[in-house]
Image (cartoon, helix red, strand yellow):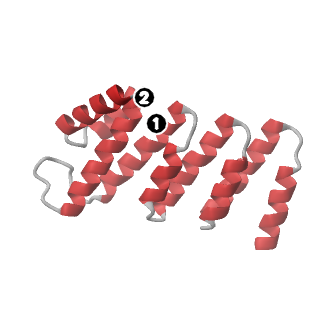
Amino acid sequence: ARTLADRAETIAGSITDRYEQAQALTALAEAAAGAGDLDRAERIARSITDPKQQAWALTALAEAVAGAGDLDRAETIARSITKPDQQAQALIGLASRCVNQSGAPLTRDSASEGVALARLRARSLVAAALALGSWEPCLGVGTRVQLAGFATLAAERLLAN
């Protein structure tokens, strides 16, 4: 299977039309991520030269990496996306995952340390997305985190930029 993946990657890399090549590499990155080969998927995604296509591939990769349980790596990938709107979408997706994986509503009264950490991470991710100017997508997740802390983090991020 690895030989076939190597061959597909070589063929995709030889496509001369930039857009067609980006689409082929995006499909390969998604296939590699789906097969659990996250390192290959990231390498392929980062090799895409079209910024918009690379952003889409990295967003899908961040979701796959988070699904595999590595939120730190997923966040690093999401923050590396150079298109602000797409980066915000990836960050919001991770924030939503944090909220959903906590297993409890993220309110001020959440007692579990794991829930508290998930709440803090979700707020931080939403605040980072807000700082990118993506207010509308943040509302769904923002309403599920402690809003006072969310507003404070958003203000801090906006002032830092």
Judging from the image, what secondary structure is the residue with disc 1 in? Answer: helix
In this view, the residue farthest toward the front is 160
Q: Quadrant of the C terminus?
A: top left
Name the residue tied to disc 2: 134
Distance from the alpha carbon under mark 1 to that under mark 2: 6 Å
Callout 2 secondary element: loop
Instruction: Work out whether 138 lies above or below 2.
Output: above
Circle 1 residues within 10 Å: few <14, some 14–19, many ≥20? many
* x then y, percent, for residue 63: 50, 53
Q: Is residue 119 above or below residue 131?
A: below
Q: Look at the picture and state if 150 lies above or below 32.
A: above
Q: Is residue 1 visible?
A: no
Look at mark 1 in the image and give the residue it sits on. 88
Kindly identify the residue that appears in the image at 28 percent across and 58 percent down.
102
> Which of 39 and 135 lies nearest the eye of the viewer?
39
Q: Residue at x 72, y 45 (%)?
A: 48
Crowd around label 2: few <14 · some 14–19 · many ≥20 (10 Å):
many
Q: Is residue 100 visible?
A: yes
Quadrant of the snapshot with the N terminus = bottom right
